[in-house]
Amino acid sequence: MGTSTVAPESDGPEDRKPQSDEAHSAFTPPLGVEQPPLPELDQPTSEFAMPKGFAAEPAAVEPEGSAFAVPATYSARQSPPAFTPAQGFPSLKLSQDAPWQDRMRTMLRMPVSERPVPEPAQKQDDDTGPAVPRVLDLTLRIGELLLAGGEGAEDVEAAMFAICRSYGLDRCEPTVTFTLLSVTHQPSLVDDPVTASRTVRRRGTDYTRLSAVYLLVADINSADQEVSLEEAYRRLAEIRRNRHPYPGWVLTAAAGGLAGSASLLLGGGLAVFLIAAAGAMLGDRLAWLAAGRGLPEFYQFAVAAAPPAALGVGASLLHAGLQPSAVITGGLFALIPGRALVAAVQDGLTGFYITASARLLEVGYFFVAIVVGVLTVLYGGVQLGATLNPEGVLNSEERPVIQILAAVLLSVTFAVLLQQERTTVLIVALNGGIAWVVYAAIAVTAGGSSVMATATAAGTVGLFGQLMARWEHTSSLPYVTAAIGPLLPGSATYLGVLNIAQNNMDDGFTSLARAAALALAIAIGVNLGGELARLFMRSPASAALRRAAKRTRGF
C-alpha cells in the first residue's frame, strides 16, 4: 500500500516571490493561527480610558478619555479639604502706595500659585508681548550691578522680580547666589520655561552707582514713568560708564583720615593722628600696587595691614611717649570688612544660606589676611624689644566732645571710601555720631556690656538708615555702612593679635573671639533695626501673613 501526497495548488508565478518584511514581523500571527478580530471604531484605546465596570458621569462635560474629565468615583460631598482651606484663599491686593521693595519682597515670599496677576507698569510698543530674552538680559545686568555693589541677596531678587513684572513677564523666579544670577520665566503650564543666567566675576564698592541703579529700577517699576527697553539699556550703559565721584588721591587721604579718627577714639593725640594717617595711606598705596600686579585680595589686605603696624612698632621703639596701640588700631579700622559682614548676616537671616556662607568665608579670609599682616610685623617688633602693652589698649581717656567729632569724621571718610554721593555724606556723619553716643552711653557711662552696647548702637544705625532709604526710595547701604565705622572691633582685633605675638595664645584667641562677637553684634543690630523700620512704614496688604523669610514660607 502506498501513500500519496497532494501538492497545494498554485495560482501562478506571483506566489513564488519572496515575502515582504511585514510577513516576517514579530507582530504578524503565524500561518494556521486564527486572526484576531479587528478593533471597533468606537472602542477607546487611550490609556486614560475608563476601565470596564466603572460607569461614567451621565452628563460629562469633557469627552470620555480626556485628562480633564471628572473621575467616576469623585464626589465633591465626600472629598476632604486637603488642599484648599474651608474659608478659601484670601484675595491679595498689594497697595501701590507702599515702596516697591516691600511689594516685591512680599510677592517673593508667596508661592507662585498665590501671587496676584501682574499689572505691567511699562507699555509695549506692539501687541506681540514683551521681548522675553531682552527683558531677562536686562534683569540680569541690573542684578549683577546690585550684587557686585554689596547689596543683599533678597534685595537683589526683589529688584529682578520688579523688572520682570514691570515689563509683563509673569511667573518669573529669580535666583541669587554669591557669584551666579539666574531668572526663569514660564509663560504658562504647557509652555517650555526660558532660563538665563549671568556670573558676577568682579566686585567693586561704588554706592553712587548703586543709587543710580536703584533709581532706574524705581522708574521702571513706576506706572507714571515710561521707560522702554531701549531707554533702560541706554541708562544702564550710562551708569556703567560713569566715573567714580572721587579721584584716587582723595580715597587715599580718606583712608588716612579714617585711621587718624579711629586713633582719636582710643585716646590718641595729634601726633598719633598723623602717624596713624600716614600708616593707613602707605598701606592703601601698597594695596593699590598689589592689585595692579594682579595679586588676590588676601595678599592686598595683608600688605595694607603691615605699614600701620610697622609705624606703631617704630613709635614704641623710639620711646617718644606715643600710644603705639592707637596707631596700629587706627590702621585696622580701615581694613575690617564691615560691609561684607553686614551683608553676610543679612543674607543668613533672610534665608539665603549659601550666599551667607560664601560671604562669611570671604570675611574670614580677609580677617586672616589682616591678622597675618599685623602679626608678622608685631612678631618682629617683639624680637627687637618693642614695649607693646596689651593692657594699654583698654585705658583710653574719656573725651566726649573729641570722640564724638572723631566718630563723625570717621563716618565721613568711610563714606568717601565707599564712593557715596555728596548729598548723603552729611546724613551718614550724623548717623555715625549718634551711634557713637549710644555706644558710649551704655558701655562707658553706664558700664554695660560692650557687645550689648554695640548691638544697640548698630540697631539705631539700621533703623535710621532704613527710614532714610524709604524716604529717598533707594538702598539703605549708603546710610548704614559708613555709620557703623566707629563701632568696628579694631581694638579687640589688635589685642588678640598682640597676645598671639607675645605667645599668649589663650588670651589672643579669646580677644579674637570677642572681636568676632562684636562684628556679629553689629551685623545683627543693623538687620534688626531695618526690620523695625518696616514696622513703622505702611506695608502691603496681607503682608503680615507672610513676614518670614522666603525659604520658611511663613511657618
Image (cartoon, rainbow, N blue to C red):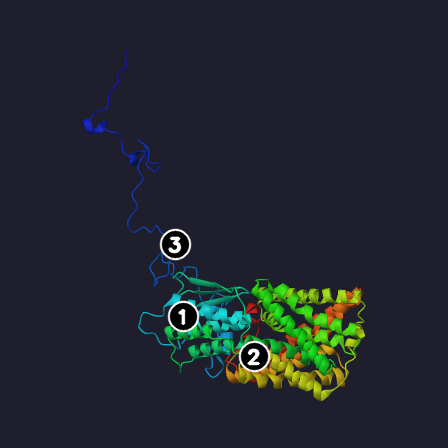
* Residue 110 in sight here: no
Name the amino acid type tagged 3: Phe
The image position of residue 98, as x and y in percent, is 49, 82
Gap between marks 2 and 1 measured at Cα: 31 Å
Disc on the earlier residue, 3 or 1: 3
Q: Which of 428 and 412 is in front in this view?
A: 412
Residue 49, compared with residue 464, is above or below; it is above
Callout 2 crowding tier (Cα within 10 Å): few <14, some 14–19, many ≥20? many
Callout 3 crowding tier (Cα within 10 Å): few <14, some 14–19, many ≥20? few
The reply to whether callout 3 and callout 1 are in contact (CB within 8 Å) is no
* Residue 292 in sight here: yes
Q: Which of marks 3 and 1 is in front?
A: 1
Q: Where does label 1 land, which residue?
A: 169
- Residue depicted at x 58% and y 86%: 426
Q: Nearer the viewer, mark 2 or mark 1?
A: 2
In the orientation shown, which residue stands out farthest toward the top? 1
Q: SS class of the residue under badge 1? A: loop
Name the amino acid type tagged 1: Leu
The image position of residue 25, as x and y in percent, is 33, 36
Name the amino acid type tagged 2: Pro
* Numbered badge on residue 478: 2
* Numbered badge on residue 48: 3
Disc on the earlier residue, 2 or 1: 1
Gap between marks 3 and 2 measured at Cα: 61 Å
Q: SS class of the residue under badge 3? A: loop
* Numbered badge on residue 134: none
Callout 1 crowding tier (Cα within 10 Å): few <14, some 14–19, many ≥20? many
The reply to whether callout 2 and callout 1 are in contact (CB within 8 Å) is no
Gap between marks 3 and 1 measured at Cα: 34 Å
